[in-house]
Image: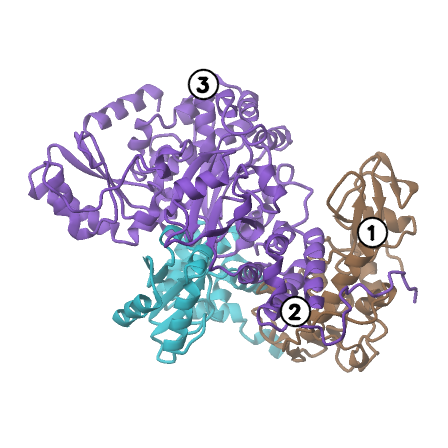
Chain colours: A cyan, B brown, C purple
Amino acid sequence: MLPLLTREKNADRVVRHASGDKRFKILEVHMKKHQFRQDALIEVLHKAQELFGFLEDDLLLFIAAKLKLPPSRVFGVATFYHFFTLKPQGEHTCVVCLGTACYVKGADKIMAAIQEKYRIKAGETTPDNQLSLLTARCIGACGIAPAVTFDGHVAPKLTPETALEKLKTLI
Amino acid sequence: MAAKTLIIDGKAVSAEEGATVLQVARDNNVAIPTLCHLEGVYDVGACRLCLVEVAGSTKLQPACTTKISEGMNIQTDSDRLRKYRRLTLELLFAERNHVCAVCVSNGHCELQTLACSLGLDHVRYDYVFPKWKVDVTHRLFGMDHNRCILCTRCVRVCWHIEGAGTKNVAGRGATAKIISDLDQPWGDSESCTECGKCVMACPTGALFHKGATAGEMEHDRDKLEFIVNAREKQQWLP
Amino acid sequence: MQLDDLKVLVAKHIGARKKIVLRTCMSAGCMSSQADVIKKNLEAEVKAQGLEADVEVRRVGCMGFCGQGPLIGVDGLSAKEKLFEFVKPTDAPAIVGSLKGAACDVQVGNPDHPFFARQMRIVRANGGIVDPERIEDYLAVGGYQALHQVLTEMKPSEVVDEITRSGLRGRGGAGFPTGLKWGTVAKSAGAKKYVVCNGDEGDPGAFMDRSVLESDPHIVLEGMAIAAYAVGADQGFLYVRAEYPLAISRLQTAIKQAKALGLLGGGIFESPFNFNIDIRIGAGAFVCGEETALMASVEGKRGTPRPRPPFPAESGLWGCPTLINNVETFANITAIIQRGGAWYAGIGTEKSKGTKVFALTGKIKNNGLIEVPMGIPLRQIVEEMGGGAPDGGHIKSVQTGGPSGGCIPAAYLDTPVDYESLTQLGSIMGSGGMVVMDDTTNMVEIAKFYMEFCMEESCGKCIPCRAGTAQMFHLLEKITQRRGTARDLAKLEELCDMVRHTSLCGLGQTAPNPVASTLKFFRSEYEALLQPDPFGPRTTAATQSTAPVTL
């Protein structure tokens, strides 16, 4: 037999590896709920990110195999939407809203203060893996601008000082 | 199918219902510049070079996806259209690193040919000079992202004609990129059948046969057309 | 379930209500200031002060005055304190005490403030009144009666006619006549049809749809069901942004409750009409607000738009006729059915009927959500309702329509707010974001801010939008950094024209608007930043020959 044919396929390897991890089981149940429909790809990716924190290659391959989609399609979708991340996130996340209302009220200054204090740029994680700094297009909290989300909780009417204080208590 | 009559550039023509403006124009020897359009695969209307003026509509319409209708009056060339087309090409040149003199497709490049025919002798916009890599991990082919114009012809032939789905677009906006499988080196792709259709389809020097040097790369478009005719019309034309 | 069964349920629900109701706003804005803790404390305090028999604490949706939040409304008491502002969790004893007449030092709001008094609430009629997580509350204010009326008394074509008569236009921004859209989908041939609600509110500075979904989810579900009956669809999709987790969870609850009562699902009101709604969660892509991109996203694909025609009404989701309307459009439907299209057409201006919800934010005293009749002068919104700029500043401009809109200078504040007038000024109605800017705001920076937004949100499919927005951002950056010349400004204007007329979808076609409108009204701010041209005074860039060259 040709050596090419005996080599284990990536997808098979991933599915075999996945059998030991409970999270893959939960993900598969979720896919089953959607009858493994290919149009549920985005829903499945949401669930996968919720379970694993980020979308690594083997996870994407697992999803592709289960939904019977080409890997390139799964990767294309996962990288199109900002919400999905392919890199591991820090212990804590800080999402600065840079919508118009927040912007005219000084969100850029908050952003600059955090960037300077923690020496990271938007989309990056501190070397000690404690904090990931992210930006949002608009979280719809314009009435209480400028707003920042710390670990999923929205904090209203911040200044650079109060934002840094919040981060201090967080980390 | 019912026949429709319409006017293209002042000339009355008739064509079958369901045809696109581009098909009718080409059947009547009216040249409309295109880049993302490729015979045999579905159109996406993305490059905006084939935009034409339709009387009664304030919006410019892409010839490749616009179906003809009775009494349509189409203008395929005007100062305004020529200006927009030239600007579109300028934006393309400035966007990535197109250097004709050292390109494998020099002399056989659709982007280059279009630029010449539209009288584009220099680009007035600042070049972006992004840093893109060249993927030469594949046994037979190479992909130079610096020369890619994201027309997605390769993606469409891979999905629609070959059916492998190896190629797709990842990311978005100016950082969008043509990928193989999970954005892995092309040579590691398990789904690639090495059929080479993507290389035949590429309008620039982004996809090329390994070993081709400056000016040597010719994209064999006839072979694609042969396959499509055979599959869809059951006609095996040499 | 029959209408009579519902009435029994409602009667029981109303009977169980208490004399005094403390309405606690639990929308995303107030939640960020611990509205959930406030509610818990209030409940404990009611118990502690022995008022359980008379007082209930109700979770409600957005009352609109978000800048003054957290808010608490008081019902059923003749007391003068009907609204508390800036409530803190520790204020609970004082507020509950005030119900017994005790003195209270919590800031009291004025329910007759122009911010409230000038409003006309149709879409937001139940916002801040009903508990969004209890369907009984919605039923108690007449909910699902319009659906019953439609199913038992009207033919689908009559529903379409009624909507057409109302003159309602799409609230997503473009203002396409809703009745015409419904009629087209109804007439399209196809065994399977879909109704899609666009809740991908992507404009920065806009939160109208979030508020409606969080405060009154059933009004949207009912509107979708009526639409489905009118066009002959049996499946609906509600596309919501992932940035709105509270809206998503309340919608899930609402759908579950409606299904349990037989108001969604099979055989609604024991008629042959079936309708199911699935929620689809967006994943952070502004372009998915464009209808063809939204459909691609619902199908689980990359959210890239495609050329229209074919329009979704003819070929939409999976090639089937599909009706796509915005959240606010659907929220108008029940009122139109119950009170008649003619009543609705009596509100607003000749071409823009009804009301519009705006999110009033930015450099303005009173931040929040307002619903006003179409045609109201911008000045009334900004100066009377909004209270003008804070800290003695002067209003310089009002931005409407987000990244697709423009900046309206203060000199034009007397413009009536309707689709045509705003378009004439180079802006658009948009989905309802209204960001006020004062004289400390640099308009070139604002134009750059929006251009960066469009550049990053461009899907990358068509060249003018992908490469054009990048070049325009680059030129704006050059100008703001005082490196630009008159030649760069000319290039910027050239690109504005080109990107607008050649882009594939609405994102690209409107991306130049913020630049074009600030150039129109605040050109001097651009010119003040320009540097002398080192290559001489050649100002126009169009020096190339226009004749085609044959190879």
| Residue A115: image location, x then y, percent | 41, 74
User: Which residue does the numbered mark 3 point to in the structure image?
Assistant: C152
Q: Nearer the viewer, residue C247 or C348?
A: C348
Which label sits in the foreground, 3 or 1?
A: 3
**Chain holding disc 1:** B
Residue displayed at 92% across by 48% down:
B28
Does residue C191 show up? yes
Q: CA distance from mark 2 to mark 3?
A: 58 Å
Question: In the structure shown, which secondary structural element does the residue marked by tag 1 occupy?
Answer: loop
Label 2 sits on a secondary structure element that is loop
Q: In this figure, which residue is indicated by the disc labeled 2?
A: B192
* Amino acid type, callout 1: Gln
Residue C61 position in % (x across, y down):
32, 41
Distance from disc 3 to disc 1, alpha carbons, whole Å, reads 55 Å
Q: Is residue B13 left or right of residue C494?
A: right
Q: Which mark is residue C231?
A: none
Callout 1 crowding tier (Cα within 10 Å): few <14, some 14–19, many ≥20: few
Residue occupying the point 36% across, 43% down? C214
Pointer 2 and pointer 3 on the same chain: no
Badge 2: residue crowd in 10 Å (few <14, some 14–19, many ≥20): some
Are circles 1 and 2 on residues that touch, CB within 8 Å?
no
Which three-letter amino acid code belongs to the residue tagged 2?
Cys
Q: Amino acid at mark 3?
A: Thr
Quarter of the figure with the C terminus of chain A? bottom left
| Chain of the residue on which disc 3 is drawn | C
Mark positioned earlier in the residue sequence (1 or 2): 2
The residue that label 1 is drawn on is: B234
Instruction: Tell me the quarter of the image containing the N terminus of chain A.
Output: bottom right
